[in-house]
Image (spheres, grey):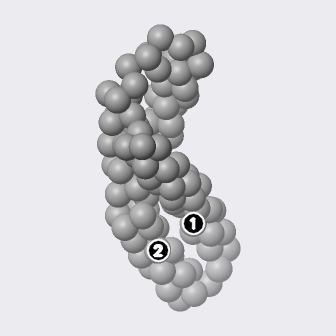
Amino acid sequence: MLYSIIKAFHIVFIVSYFAGIFYLVRIFVYYKDTDEFEETKKKILREQYVFMARRLWNIITVPAGIIMLATGITMIMLNLGLMKTPWFHLKLTFLIGLGIYHYWCWKKLNEI
């Protein structure tokens, strides 16, 4: 029963994390689209996009990622048999890629 509850939380926070991380990149696109605007409009929009991106990152994406990671590690600890399955090793490989993508988004957010 405990495992099922933790798994449910894990799934909810996976969805929240991915919504945040992919919408952040959409905000980057909106930010870049302001290059052709007049200076006043560009400045106002860019300030708003930076504000939105930082709030999304700090309020949704990072907390959801931390909870997702914590529940994932808890599920591994409760079911060590997962470490013996090939699909789980593939999943962990993709998680390394996700970590690299997360780091890239963080670096881009700090650049704007």
Give the amino acid at mark 2.
Answer: Met
Q: Earlier in the sequence, mark 2 or mark 1?
A: 1
Q: Residue visible at 41% across and 55% down? A: 64
- What is the spatial separation of the Cα atoms under label 2 and label 1, in whole angstroms? 8 Å
Q: Residue visible at 32% across and 42% down? A: 70
Q: Residue visible at 42% across and 43% down? A: 1
Res 29 seen here: yes
Q: Quadrant of the C terminus?
A: bottom left
Q: Residue visible at 33% across and 36% down? A: 74
Label 2–label 1 contact, CB within 8 A: yes
User: Considering the numbered disc 1 on the image, is that residue within a helix, a strand or a loop?
Assistant: helix
Looking at the image, residue 90 sits to the left or right of residue 2; the answer is: right
* In the rendered image, the vertical position of residue 25 relative to residue 2, given as above or below: below
Q: Nearer the viewer, residue 105 or 71?
A: 71
Res 105 seen here: no
Badge number at residue 27: 1
Badge number at residue 52: 2
Residue 13 in the image: x percent, y percent? Answer: 47, 54
Give the amino acid at mark 1.
Answer: Ile
Q: Quadrant of residue 99?
A: top left
Badge number at residue 35: none
Residue 50 in the image: x percent, y percent? Answer: 44, 71
Q: Nearer the viewer, residue 70 or 30?
A: 70
Residue 36 in the image: x percent, y percent? Answer: 67, 73
* In the rendered image, the vertical position of residue 2 relative to residue 62, given as above or below: above
User: Considering the numbered disc 2 on the image, is that residue within a helix, a strand or a loop?
Assistant: helix
